[in-house]
Image (cartoon, rainbow, N blue to C red):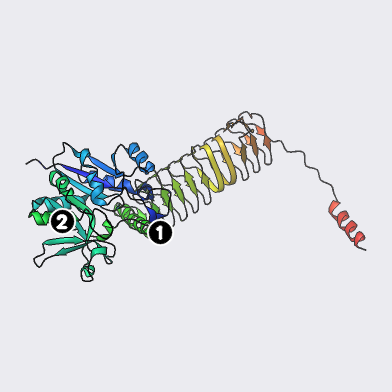
Amino acid sequence: MQRQRLAALILAAGKSTRMKSARSKVLHNLAGRPVLAYTIDAAKGAGAKPVKVVVAPFQTDIKAYLDEVEVDFVLQKEQLGTAHAVMVAERAFVGFDGDILILCGDVPLARPESLREFVDAVRAKRAVLGVLSMAPSNPAGYGRIVRDLDGSVIKIVEEKEASPKEKTIREVNSGIILADREWLFSSLKKVSNANAKGEYYLTDLVGIALKEGVGVVAHRCEPAEDFHGINTRVELARAAEHMRERINKSFMLAGAGLIDYRHTYVDFGVHIGQDTSVLPFTFILGNTKIGSGCTIENGVVIRDAIVGNGVHIKANSVIEGSKISDGAVVGPFARVRPGSKVGAGARIGNFVELKKCEMKAGAKAGHLSYLGDAIVGAHANIGCGTITCNYDGREKHMTVIGDEVFVGSDTQFVAPVRIGRGAVIGAGSTITRNVPPSALALSRSEQKTVKGYAERKRKSHKSRKR
């Protein structure tokens, strides 16, 4: 038997006033993605095709995002309630024969499997209308599901319209509805706005369906937290907490060791390999991939980076848009800026900054150095306080340091400059010209020693005091 077709309509045309933000609430960041992205993915994951989003004309940011992700939108020129938002989408589903899953764009935690369970439960009872219900610990603000003695749905009453007794009901409407397309759009024309807010409520469809004697199902899904909406920044933070727990537990079940998953911040889409240990207060963001057997210490920030196997990132280091190869050690307090590469077994120590710098295999920069627009050869050693002077006021220039070069402390390389394989750079040098392989280069002035100077200075000081 061929499965009935399923489409999805996501309601996202709210004014987001309680977010106190110039940005639409469904585009606020949640674990590295817009809130709306999760709802779209959940709809697709449940098998809905097509997926369309209702937006208001002033929501240019949402329209731009939907264009980017290639999802069609429908304009709701006036915000007259949830039923009105669905009414304006009728033309978008001309020619579609099947059920429409109506979702809220600000409910990002709904799982595809829960939506599929809901759809299957409604279809199993051959109902034309289904409501996904939940039972939160605090039902305030939600429409209550009112049932008769045998458990059948009588109505859904919005909180402002509910009696004191009805407000004690814990089972509420999540805002997620499934309806047969043909019945849905014909019944929406019967919805009235004669209520306290003067709006067209989508939940009035329940009364219409019951009056017509067609099937209505309220299917309860758990946990309730998966269907909570976001209206304020507080609720966004709570959703982020739930998403963080979901993401981090998935890593632990796959073999990664997150020491304190409640205080480890990992974006959706990140990969962390088996036996990698991640300490608390670490942020792993964007399109980051971390291999197996790594140690990521506390306070580390990694964004859009590729980290190999057996890498040790020490405390309070920042890595962005770079590649760290197998067995490398970075930090503590190191900064690896975009476009850098740290080779296998290389070591970047405390307060070392790389910018578009390639450290080849086994190279070392122990501490307090800036290496920008540079290539550092295999097994080269960079002494403390080394700087590549890469900017001449107009353009950036390259410094190329060959394999097995030894660079003494407090050296400045004035780019462009090349250092040959195996060369030695004396401490305190300013290198402005190329250095051939195996040569010694130093530019400091000759040391002068004045014997007896300190004693004469002390005597002069004492005589002035008298």
> Viewer-nearest of labels 1 and 2?
2
Asked whether 444 or 204 is in front, the reply is 204
Callout 2: SS: helix
Kindly identify the residue that appears in the image at 16 percent across and 61 percent down. 155
Which residue is the site of mark 1?
Answer: 263
Name the quarter where the C terminus is drawn. bottom right
**Relative horizontal placement of residue 117, taking residue 52 as reference (left or right):** left
Q: Can the viewer see residue 173 in this picture? A: yes
User: Can you give x and y, in whole percent of width and height, for residue 442 in the image?
Assistant: 69, 36
Residue 111 appears in the figure: no
Q: Would you say 186 lies left or right of 137 here?
A: left
Residue reaching furthest front? Answer: 194
Q: Which residue is mark 2?
A: 206
The answer to whether residue 459 is left or right of residue 76 is right
Residue 106 position in % (x across, y down): 31, 52
Please state which amino acid type lies under the numbered disc 1: His
Total labels: the figure holds 2
Does residue 31 lie above or below 394 as drawn? Answer: below
Real-space CA distance between mark 1 and mark 2, rounded to the nearest whole angstrom? 43 Å
**Picture layout, residue 90 above or below residue 298:** above
- Residue 116 location (% of width, % of height): 18, 49
- Expressed as whole percent of the image width and height from the top left, the position of residue 87 reads 22, 45
Q: Amino acid at mark 2?
A: Val
